[in-house]
């Protein structure tokens, strides 16, 4: 492991001026440091900062240092936004969820094996301009949406998919002050700069995630399809939030995970749902366009059909046949 300086603080302004990589739960950063992928000169332990708690009426504000387990168990989340609780509970074993934080979950880096193996020279995320070994390598788990010639890695966060379906925003603080960024603008597609994965400015820190109030009743849920039931990342996932009133779908949010370089909104699916009455035929028609624009690779073409079937299954589960 690369030698580094370690500092711990309980003051947010002091942390922002410390000039290092932030460490909260450490479930991803420490692993990457041990593998030689990350090699910060300074690590700033922020676990003691006052960024905990879940508050709000209607909407919710979740502190960045709330653990995955705490958030998943919170009544306001379980009752009002089950899509979040389900995404969190599918995001790792209890040992991880008891330590990993909401902010850290959004900041976790891709699980692409080529990125995490420093003996592989071609990885534009680690070494910009070096190439992407996954394009012509083993790419079964890689993205089919939002890819570029520079990178085809998926974003691994289940929580980010659920938050995107709820139009959440990310609260940030930094040397230049506080600001708020929509979740779908916080995580960045690779384009020609896959090493730039998020909209954080130098020295900035996630302080909270906020979910706006939604019209009720809101039906939401998260479906994750993976190779094994636990400790596995999504091949495909679907986060859905539906507001059905008077037998008509008033609003629909559908987001896919495991298939995109970022959580992937499916606006054409949503368009086909709004204003319609729930029915098995509607779910099938809407899901049929879920994979539009997909660019499969050699080993992951199956994801396009799996995505359509997963979206239809989740729509059917939540929407019924009213």
Image: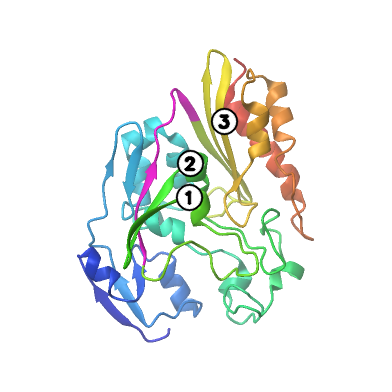
Q: Relative to residue 137, is residue 249 drawn left or right? A: left
Graded by Cα atoms within 10 Å as few (under 14), some (14 to 19) or many (20 or more), the crowding at tag 1 reads many
User: Are the two marked residues, 3 and 1, in contact with CB atoms closer than 8 angstroms?
Assistant: no
Residue pushed farthest front?
A: 176
Residue pushed farthest right?
A: 298
Graded by Cα atoms within 10 Å as few (under 14), some (14 to 19) or many (20 or more), the crowding at tag 2 reads some
Secondary structure type for disc 3: strand
Residue depicted at x 62% and y 64%:
190
How far, Cα to Cα, is label 3 from label 1? 17 Å
Question: What residue is shown with label 2?
Answer: 167
Question: What residue is shown with label 1?
Answer: 183
User: Along the polypeptide, which appears first: circle 1 or circle 2?
Assistant: 2
Residue 259 drawn at (x, y percent):
65, 51
Q: Quadrant of residue 28?
A: bottom left
User: Are the two marked residues, 2 and 3, in contact with CB atoms closer than 8 angstroms?
Assistant: no
Q: Relative to residue 171, is residue 153 drawn left or right? A: right
Residue 319 drawn at (x, y percent):
58, 24
Q: In which quarter of the image is residue 299?
A: bottom right
How far, Cα to Cα, is label 1 from label 2? 7 Å
Position above or below: 81 against 96 = above
> Residue 252 shows which numbered tag?
3
Say which of 106 and 190 sits in front. Answer: 190
């Amino acid at each position: 492991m690369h030698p580094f300086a370690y500092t711990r603080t309980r003051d947010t302004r002091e942390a922002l001026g410390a000039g290092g990589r932030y460490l909260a739960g450490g479930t991803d950063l420490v692993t990457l440091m041990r593998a030689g992928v990350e090699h910060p000169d300074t690590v700033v332990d922020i676990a003691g900062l006052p960024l905990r708690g879940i508050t709000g009426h209607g909407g919710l504000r979740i502190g960045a240092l709330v653990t995955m387990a705490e958030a998943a168990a919170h009544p306001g989340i379980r009752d009002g936004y089950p899509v979040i609780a389900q995404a969190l509970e599918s995001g790792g074993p209890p040992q991880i969820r008891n330590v990993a934080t909401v902010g850290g979950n959004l900041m976790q880096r891709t699980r692409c094996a080529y990125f995490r193996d420093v003996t592989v020279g071609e990885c534009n995320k680690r070494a910009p301009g070096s190439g992407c070994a996954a394009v012509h390598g083993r790419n079964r788990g890689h993205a089919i949406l939002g890819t570029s010639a520079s990178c085809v890695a998926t974003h691994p966060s289940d929580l980010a998919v659920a938050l995107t379906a709820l139009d959440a925003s990310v609260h940030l603080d930094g040397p230049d002050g506080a600001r708020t960024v929509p979740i779908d603008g916080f995580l960045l597609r690779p384009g020609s700069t896959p090493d730039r994965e998020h909209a954080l400015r130098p020295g900035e820190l996630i302080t909270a995630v906020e979910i706006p109030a939604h019209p009720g009743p809101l039906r939401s849920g998260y479906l994750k399809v993976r190779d094994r039931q636990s400790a596995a990342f999504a091949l495909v996932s679907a986060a859905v939030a539906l507001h059905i009133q008077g037998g008509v779908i008033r609003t629909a949010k559908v987001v896919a995970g495991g298939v995109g370089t970022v959580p992937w909104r499916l606006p054409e699916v949503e368009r086909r749902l709004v204003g319609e009455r729930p029915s098995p035929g509607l779910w099938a028609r809407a899901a049929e366009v879920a994979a539009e624009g997909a660019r499969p690779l050699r080993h992951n073409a199956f994801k396009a059909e799996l995505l359509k079937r997963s979206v239809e299954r989740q729509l059917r589960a939540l929407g019924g046949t009213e």
